Image (cartoon, helix red, strand yellow):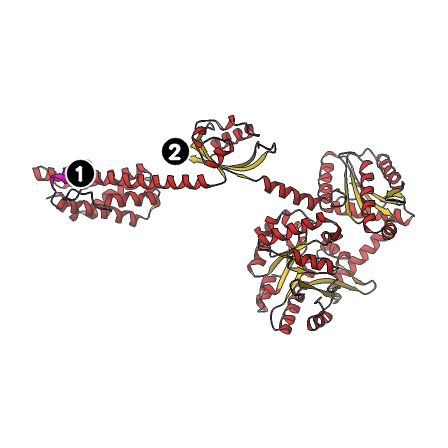
């Protein structure tokens, strides 16, 4: 039986035999067995057809060299079986060794079964075997050539991409010598790429070279990518900071044979982040840590105190008669007075102590490693003495003084919030006693505590008794002055104390676990009101509600706001949710899931008081934030402060670049409104348009267009 006929008649048996070999090829294990078998069938059919066709002397000579030729001597078919095989296997992730092994397995399968069926004896059958080997050699040659061509094309494409990239890219051997360098990295050293090949990365004078060598050794051991930062010297003397990633290149045995590296210049980004971080954590007026950074440092010092057993003292400092001086001399002079007061307080403390400005004329000081009550009292006396000295403000000499409240951790309180609250009570005790003195927190300061406990008891009944109210403040589109949205603001109609703002009871609600019940009530009421106003206007209307950090807690039992809107058949974007920057600075899994759930439901997200916290603008985009609400502090004295104007313009531009819309809070003057409109802010909110009002009055605003100015 001729070999061509044998292959055609026994193709299924040959494929079965071939599969036993093919299973040993690692790349073949990842392919669909049916596709693998069909591909082998096509090759066998092509070989059988080739064996059955006449062959010229020229074709025989060509095949002996592994080249197919037409009868006329021209180059072979433009897309032979071998070329298809090489190209296909390249695309399937086969190595060149896998390609060769697959064809060798095919050869062995055919010859093994043919010899077993009828060993070739006559000349024609021996000639068939020769032609079969030549056909396989041709397949092999064309497969390897096609595979190599695709590989070379891919390498060329990759080199072109890397050469055009502004990032620094290179490939290193295990000892840190360059195997490949792209144009951007070579230009860093003023050399063509070829001059860097073979040089060691550690000979280039990099800052942090020792750490980089350690990371490469670690990568070789662990075979896992690593990230880091390094600095390059620059011509202007300022180092350029780069963020890099090292990725292992593994051989067939899984060992590291090279390291691929990409480095991106992050100098400007780090400078921007540093600027934003300072703006978020330091008081713009005095340069002292602000409330956010103060709380962070206080928490850290309390943890340190718990570990080493050394007490920490907290001073709450309030200026006496500051309001009178501020009203008399004006805000500019008042700001100068606060700056001088901050400098005097700072001068009384050690370098390791922290002085912060909470706002207004309120300062705090954290005293670490205190030696005892006498030590704290001496510092208080120094501060009081400095504050009692007249302040020279222009031609005026201003006399103020200070009241200081003191709490000590852990004897007076065991948490930062309670420590601050106790110091605040002690400060008011000093002020109520005439000021210009300090008072240590004492357990007999119960009156304020009793009022607090009574308020807690009343708060537990506020929701079931129907005492909570929602007031609404317009959010105006700056382009035309029309009311487009509203913020729902919670009030408590207390039976004895009257209408209370949230600052007086939200903290208590969080402490006693009522915040989620209250928050859910606010949401359902606001959503219903948004629907009513949308129907009134014949379109959509959005109401925003506030969500405190405590409402993002993982253990919180709460209403699904998205599900509530679906049940009501209400669009998600009829409500937006505002939350503080702090939610983004250390996003828990629960908070991340909650933000994602709200976004997926179409509920828009807004970061409230932006600029007073520590989040970056990039973080806003990461969590699909829709609105950035600029903190009202940036508008205070904005007209006279070019620095604030620059910061505001930068925030607005960056927000728009990331696709966020900007709402300015605390707009009180037409001048502020006009400046914000020119700067590109989208919306504004503040007393210029309306104070927060009940729903009935807000409906009148919508109907009468009173918010248009």
Say above or below: 302 vs 12.
Answer: above
Marking on residue 63: 1
Asked if one can make out residue 132 in the rendered structure from this viewpoint, the answer is yes
Disc 2: CA contacts within 10 A as few (<14), some (14-19) or many (>=20): few
Decide whether residue 65 is among the magenta residues.
yes
Coordinates of residue 364 in the picture (x, y in percent): 79, 43
Horizontal side of 14 relative to 544 (left or right) equals left
* 636 or 613, nearer to the observer: 636
Marking on residue 253: 2
Horizontal side of 424 relative to 304 (left or right) equals right
Specify the principal SS of the magenta part.
loop
Of circles 1 and 2, the one toward us is 1
SS class of the residue under badge 1? helix
Disc 1: CA contacts within 10 A as few (<14), some (14-19) or many (>=20): many
Coordinates of residue 254 in the picture (x, y in percent): 41, 34
Coordinates of residue 242 in the picture (x, y in percent): 55, 37
């Amino acid at each position: 039986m001729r070999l061509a006929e044998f292959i055609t008649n026994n193709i299924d048996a040959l494929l079965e035999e071939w599969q036993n070999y093919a299973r040993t090829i690692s790349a073949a294990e990842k392919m669909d067995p049916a596709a693998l078998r069909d591909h082998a069938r096509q090759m066998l059919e092509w070989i059988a057809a080739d064996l059955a066709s006449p062959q010229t002397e020229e074709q025989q000579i060509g095949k002996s060299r592994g080249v197919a030729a037409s009868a006329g001597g021209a180059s072979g078919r433009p897309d032979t079986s071998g070329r298809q095989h090489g190209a296909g296997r390249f695309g399937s992730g086969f190595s060149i060794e896998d390609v060769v092994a697959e064809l060798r397995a095919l050869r062995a399968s055919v010859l093994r079964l043919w010899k077993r069926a009828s060993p070739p004896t006559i000349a024609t059958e021996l000639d068939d075997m020769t032609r079969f080997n030549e056909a396989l050699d041709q397949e092999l040659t064309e497969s390897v050539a096609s595979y190599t061509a695709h590989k070379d094309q891919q390498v060329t494409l990759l080199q072109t991409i890397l050469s055009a990239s502004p990032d620094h890219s290179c490939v290193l051997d295990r000892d840190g010598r360059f195997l490949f360098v792209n144009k951007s990295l070579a230009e860093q050293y003023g050399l063509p790429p070829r001059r860097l090949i073979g040089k060691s990365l550690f000979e280039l004078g990099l800052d942090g070279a020792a750490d980089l060598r350690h990371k490469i050794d670690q990568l070789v051991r662990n075979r896992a990518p690593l990230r880091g930062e390094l600095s390059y010297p620059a011509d202007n003397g300022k180092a350029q900071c780069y963020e890099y990633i090292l990725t292992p290149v593994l051989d067939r045995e899984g060992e590291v044979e090279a390291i691929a590296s990409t480095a991106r210049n992050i100098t400007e980004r780090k400078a921007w982040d540093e600027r934003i971080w300072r703006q978020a954590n330091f008081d713009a007026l005095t340069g002292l840590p602000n409330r956010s950074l103060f709380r962070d440092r206080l928490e850290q010092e309390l943890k340190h105190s718990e570990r080493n057993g050394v007490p920490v003292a907290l001073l709450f400092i309030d200026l006496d008669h500051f309001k009178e001086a501020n009203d008399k001399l004006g805000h500019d002079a008042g700001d100068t007075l606060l700056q001088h007061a901050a400098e005097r307080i700072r001068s009384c403390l050690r370098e390791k102590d922290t002085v912060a400005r909470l706002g207004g004329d309120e300062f705090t000081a954290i005293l670490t490693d205190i030696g005892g009550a006498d030590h704290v009292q001496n510092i208080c006396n120094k501060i009081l003495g400095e504050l009692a000295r007249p302040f020279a403000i222009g031609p005026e000499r201003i006399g103020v003084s200070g009241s200081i409240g003191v709490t000590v951790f852990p004897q007076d309180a065991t948490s930062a919030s309670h420590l601050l609250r106790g110091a605040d009570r002690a400060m008011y005790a000093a002020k109520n006693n005439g000021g210009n003195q300090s008072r240590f927190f004492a357990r007999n300061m119960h009156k304020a505590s009793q009022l607090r406990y009574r308020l807690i008891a009343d708060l537990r009944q506020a929701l079931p008794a129907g005492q909570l109210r929602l007031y609404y403040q317009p959010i105006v589109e700056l382009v035309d002055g029309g009311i487009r949205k509203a913020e729902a603001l919670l009030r408590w109609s207390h039976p004895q104390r009257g209408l209370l703002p949230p600052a007086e009871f939200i903290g208590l609600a969080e402490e006693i676990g009522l915040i989620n019940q209250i928050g859910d009530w606010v949401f359902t009421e606001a959503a219903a009101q948004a629907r009513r106003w949308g129907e009134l206007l014949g379109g959509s209307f959005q109401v925003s509600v506030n969500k405190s950090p405590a409402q993002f807690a993982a253990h919180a039992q709460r209403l699904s706001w998205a599900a509530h809107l679906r049940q009501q058949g209400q669009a998600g974007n009829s409500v937006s949710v505002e939350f503080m920057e702090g939610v983004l600075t250390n996003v828990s899994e629960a908070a991340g899931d909650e933000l994602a759930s709200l976004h997926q439901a179409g509920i828009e997200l807004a970061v409230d008081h932006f600029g007073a916290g520590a989040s970056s603008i990039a973080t806003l985009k990461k969590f699909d934030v829709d609105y950035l609400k600029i903190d009202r502090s940036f508008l205070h004295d904005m007209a006279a402060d070019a620095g604030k104007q620059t910061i505001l313009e930068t925030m607005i531009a960056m927000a728009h670049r990331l696709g966020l819309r900007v709402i300015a809070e605390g707009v009180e003057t037409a001048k502020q409104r006009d400046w914000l409109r020119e700067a590109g802010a989208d919306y504004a909110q503040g007393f210029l348009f309306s104070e927060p009002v009940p729903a009935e009055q807000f409906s009148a605003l919508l109907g009468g267009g009173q918010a248009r100015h």
